[in-house]
Image (tube, grey):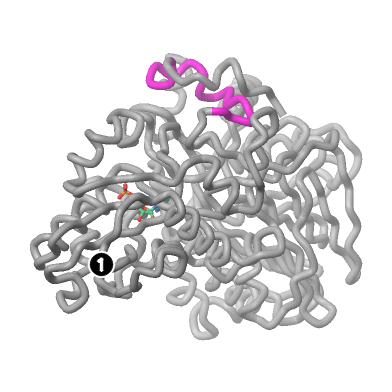
Amino acid sequence: MKNRLNFLKKFEVRQSHVPRFNEECGVFGISGTKDAAALTALGLHALQHRGQEGCGIVSYDGNSYHSERKFGLVGDNFTKKHSLDKLKGKIAIGHNRYSTTGGETIRNIQPFYADLHGGAISIAHNGNLTNALLLREQMVREGAIFQTTSDTETIVQLVARSKKKDILNKIIDALMQIQGGYALSIIANGTLIGARDPLGIRPLVLGKFKNAFILASETCALDIIGAKFIREIENGEVVVIKDNKVESRRPFPKKQIKPCVFEYIYFSRPDSILKNKTAYEYRKNLGTYLAKETDIKPDVVVPVPDSGVPAALGFSQESGIPFELGLIRNHYVGRTFIEPTQQIRSLGVKLKLNPNQSSIKKKKVVLIDDSLVRGTTSTKIIKMLYDFGAKEVHMRIASPAIKYPDFYGVDTPTQEELLAANKNLEEMCKYIGAKSLKFLSLDGLYQALGYDERDNDNPQFTDHYFTGEYPVRPLDYLNDESLKKLSFLSLASNN
Ligand code: AMP
């Protein structure tokens, strides 16, 4: 590991604790329309919540590839005036980047492009590979030159080195070597290719717009352009889209799908469809179950906007306690969590929310949020509510306590920074300054998401945040000192 960390240092990757490359992102791809780049820009705009650090589009016009990659938001970068006119062709892929890791360089913004023996490839990736560093070390030892600090480049290098004959089989060959969570949108030799990891940890859907087929992280990217949602890409499925036809390959042994539970709880946009229901419906139901498990009778239910709103509505409807907007959000500030440092993150909460006195003064408030990570948001908000006259503030969280970090593409802090990993319920309650604190139970979570009870041998979600049960052994992280006490090491198997 020491060598590995030295190696990473050279590439500017964060290595103070667990090195992580490629955080939660959004991908899009379209094939079969002359407006491919413009529609990709719209799709990426709908997926903006998945990443705001940078965005990029690569198009292919039958002869040449065209690429534009920028820092910042889609709406600020991909307009006719700026970049769209240059992105010619009937096929395009796009990417929104979210990252708190080092290497804030344009080289890390996707889609990546490379000229390989047997054809060119451009790739956009959402997720995090758990063996990318091991593979990378090995390839560097053998002479490979890496240009970026992203794990996505590991995929490109594996494709480049594959001995298989055609580009599709080279890509499949590369997929067989990588582990972790991934949803990929690729252009290779004029073909749009999509791939989802063997457990379907990261989301990817298929849609249709007139004769064009679309790949997107979420269905909200289809709705924005009036495209039809066809189906989710299956776990372990590789789809090949050419000449307005979709072909499927299933190179991996069949496994039960285990989507990341955090897509349901927080990450996906509320209007996106996950397994036949909107994320909004699931989140409202999480609030319903939270109310079923509650032991208090407050005067008002107040959501932490926007992430706690659906759960607070469910809580209010189930309990009969009125829902009130006790906090008003300034919509011109991005997601607090997305700010890179703790100091800025704390400042972000103040910039973003202000109490609405008329709803909370002299009231017993139950404050609802979807999740509690470091406790930054709730600590600030609870103080604000008391400062503005609330009589009591009871915090209720519409998911279980997060005790374990993620390795598959969601930006969770290290275990040292996770409040619930280091404090018991009473200590957490004191820390955030609430009158009482309660989390939804794990059974409540499973019931709210549509399962009668959790089957312990076979959880239906990737739910390691709460259980420490990791579905894919994160090889790159196994020797990290800060992870030594985690229980997953004996539980997870390789995919
Ligand atoms: P914290 O303030 O650290 O306790 O974080 C909790 C807040 O962050 C909640 O309001 C969540 O909606 C939000 N949140 C939870 N997970 C994530 C994530 N992976 N990325 C961004 N925000 C998150």
Magenta-highlighted stretch: main secondary structure?
loop
At 47% from the left and 73% from the top, the residue drawn is 77
Spot occupied by residue 67 in the image (x, y as percentages of width and height)? 61, 64
Asked if residue 478 is among those painted magenta in the image, a careful observer would answer: yes
Provide the secondary structure element on which disc 1 rests. loop
Residue at 29% across, 30% down: 424
Q: Which residues are magenta?
A: 469-484
What kind of residue is marked 1? Asp
Residue drawn at the location 53% of the way across and 47% of the way down: 445
Q: Position of residue 443 (x, y in %)?
A: 55, 41
Label 1 environment density (alpha carbons within 10 Å; few <14, some 14–19, many ≥20): some
Measured along the vertical axis of the image, is residue 194 above or below residue 133?
below
- With 207 as the anchor, is 21 left or right in this view? left
User: Which percent across, then down, holds residue 427?
Assistant: 22, 34
Residue at image mark 1: 299
Judge whether residue 482 is colored magenta: yes
Whether 366 is drawn above or below 118: the answer is below
